[in-house]
Image (spheres, grey):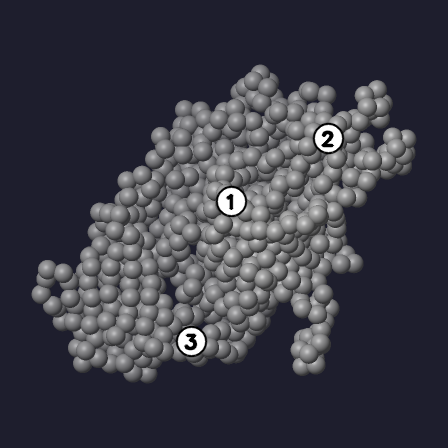
Amino acid sequence: MTRIRIDELKPLRPRYRVPDVLVADPPTARLSVSGRDENSVELTVAEGPYKIILTGRPFRLDLLEDRSLVLSVNARGLMVFEHQRLPRNSEEQKEPAEGNGSPNEEAAGKADQPEENREKDEKDEPGAWEEMFKTHSDSKPFGPTSVGLDFSLPGMEHVYGIPEHADDLRLKATEGGEPYRLYNLDVFQYELYNPMALYGSVPVLLAHSIHRDLGIFWLNAAETWVDISSNTAGKTLFGKMLDYLQGGGETPQTDVRWMSESGIIDVFLLLGPTISDVFHQYASLTGTQALPPLFSLGYHQSRWNYRDEADVFDVDQGFDNHDIPCDVIWLDIEHADGKRYFTWDSSRFPQPLAMLEHLAGKRRKLVTIVDPHIKVDSEYRVHEELRSQGLYVKTRDGSDYEGWCWPGSAGYPDFTNIKMRAWWANMFSFDKYEGSASNLFIWNDMNEPSVFNGPEVTMLKDARHDGGWEHRDIHNIYGFYVHMATAEGLIQRSGGMERPFVLARAFFAGSQRFGAVWTGDNAAEWGHLKISIPMCLSMGLVGLSFCGADIGGFFKNPEPELLMRWYQMGAYQPFFRAHAHMDTGRREPWLLAPEYLGPIRDALRQRYALLPFWYTLFYRAHLDGHPVMRPMWVQYPKDVATFSLDDQFMLGDSLLVHPVAEPGARGVQVYLPGEGEVWYDIQSYQKHHGPQTLYLPVTFSSIPVFQRGGTIIPRWERVRRSSDCMKDDPITLYVALSPQGTAEGELYLDDGHTFNYETQNEFLFRKFIFSGNTLTSSSADPRGHFETPIWIERVVILGAGKPASVLLETEGLPETILTFHHNAETSVLTLRKPEVHVSTDWSIHLR
């Protein structure tokens, strides 16, 4: 990785440098001067093949691997660094501050202008000191302070990332249109296929080619725009092929320009060279996905709002009556007393602890919403404490900032203040949050922050935060801090023992350390169902693996077929929650006709059967930063046909999922990649060879999912009412053989809810390998130890011939002959009851 930081030498006041996002200061390597002339210097990294050529005027940085140009910085000369100024009416302005020379030649030239010319420039510049957004005034006490820098990526024509946008997975060239915008906003009924800003912002862009992968991490929390241009944009595939055949045409290149309203230039260049390396590099900076509690990978039932305790009990019982698994019921803003968070409406929820105890008896959880806007009410303890301790965001004149949100007039806690975050975390203790219990978890909505009467439904940019920072400096990190403080509160309330679950709508780089996110207020439309795939894939690429979309769509009423297909889609996305607006009709699954309820029940049961696989994938994401839900090109980086594919995806390296996303569909086109690879339909076990585009007929009950040959997947086959009821059940292994007759897989187990896996090494991480007609189980991490009753119940081998006999060999015990069944038509071999403990080393030999 290469880090570039550019700041003013002697600013009028320090410029904002984003804190708390990096998990540690990254280690540095020495650079040696390996060449120089009067305007440039060549720097060589002590270890490795990289060199940097730094040019002074005009400023430019070229990064080479051996003799190949990997990336250029400011090659187009678009660097901008607007210096802070004293207000025009200040007497001090007559004496310009020393040391404010720009590293950019153009800016340096301006600094050398006669003073009267500079004043003329400032007077002629509209909006330099104040801008208007409709009726809102945005004062700029230090004038315009934007920064920008361009990056040229030779050999690259596919770029991804910079969520959140409701757009294709592959980012489009923005020439002639609006750039992609990163500015966390509460957007009402957002448009699809649009670069407009949404709820979250992760300023990380990935570039991919068949030769290498790169990443650019622009560490800036202000409003940011990303302009993308490409010398191949607009060329047809035929045109590119003609260039190739004629030996002409340019080398593909993508140019990316980043622009932020304030702050400094602080950018990490993640040099790969593989996508796996880029994931590791980014994770080393901002951390990995928090390992979620097991229950949170189950199904969540929500709407705005379940009316009262009786309604909650009825919904809970409905799942049992209709044999549908569910882990969590959610309560939206109406559960609180007049939308005063940390309270309960005593008429609707008079006995919250009894309600929580009832759900705990069913081994289910409850989630309540706690939003970061606090009702201004002198009788409300939370407001009075925040006001008296000075913990609210301030206006530019120093009074408490007030806006309008769900409770009416509301104050906004200043989560950039460490004292505020500590106060907030303490509010989740059981004695402070009365009526809460250990099976209650939290949802932070509206944390952009949402201000109904503010510009673009958010906070004024000249509002003031701890340390005197303006809101313009910190806007995109506000939701990150809310998420952080809430997660810390749930950890604290258990004495540091229990893992939290917190869902947040707004996010930033590093938010993966605190919990889950979702795609916000979508609509009950087929287009929103489809867009959930690229939206979640984009988040996973930049560390946010725990992502999902509201099942059925938040706004509007879904037709039964759409709702059914959304459950089938959601069952194979990481965060699986149904949610709906208060004006929509009730849509619990059992309210649908049997022809839709049956497939929904089947989808939910498939989700629960795969929980050991999901949990293992999240552990792997927690270890090394690899996304759980992955674009096809991550698994097949040299297959150009996968580079723009975003209607199907991989879970880990094992399952390919192509959900049905068209009304009345009778079939889907599935691309099965991989030269010499095989794929097994997980329902029929039919084997297909890659690479090919397969037309697969579908019915209402179809969810096209394929297991890649060469992988082993663990399942819990006895689906019960919740994950907690299943966590000690036996495991069935599904071994999908490659054409070479080999397969590998993993299984991670722990208690599902504490940090003991981290603090006490209380976990099991098992490795399964099938080779030479032998399946072996061994420890993937010998540090781990965990007491569990789990055993291996069955082994199902796909693509297997019929053996003469099957022998189980366990250390210290005599060989055992296993019974088996072989289906010649499907080539499926089922080994019954090996009855070995999951922690035991063993081998099964097919003779």
What residue is rendered at 50% in x and 38% in y? 25
Q: Which residue is mark 1?
A: 30
Q: Is residue 371 above or below residue 543?
A: above
Q: CA distance from mark 3 to mark 2?
A: 62 Å
Closer-to-camera residue (579/141): 141
User: Is residue 516 visible from the viewing direction of this image?
Assistant: no
Closer-to-camera residue (300/309): 300
Q: Is residue 477 left or right of residue 777?
A: right
Q: Residues within 10 Å of mark 3 (few under 14, many from 20)?
A: some
Q: Is residue 613 left or right of residue 229?
A: left
Mark before the other along the chain sequence, 3 or 2: 2
Type of residue at label 1? Arg
Residue found at the very far top of the displayed protein: 388
Q: Are marks 1 and 2 in contact (CB under 8 Å)?
A: no
Q: Which one is in front in this view, the residue at disc 1 or the one at disc 2?
A: 1
Q: Is residue 149 left or right of residue 437?
A: right
Q: Which residue is mark 3?
A: 677
Mark before the other along the chain sequence, 1 or 3: 1
Picture quadrant of residue 477: top right
Type of residue at label 3? Glu
Q: Residues within 10 Å of mark 1 (few under 14, many from 20)?
A: few
* Residue 398: x %, y % from top left: 69, 20
Q: Secondary structure at mark 1?
A: loop
* Residue 159: x %, y % from top left: 62, 60
Closer-to-camera residue (10/244): 10
Q: Which one is in front in this view, the residue at disc 3 or the one at disc 2?
A: 2
* Residue 342: x %, y % from top left: 50, 29
Q: Which residue is mark 2?
A: 99
Q: Which one is in front in this view, the residue at disc 1 or the one at disc 3?
A: 1
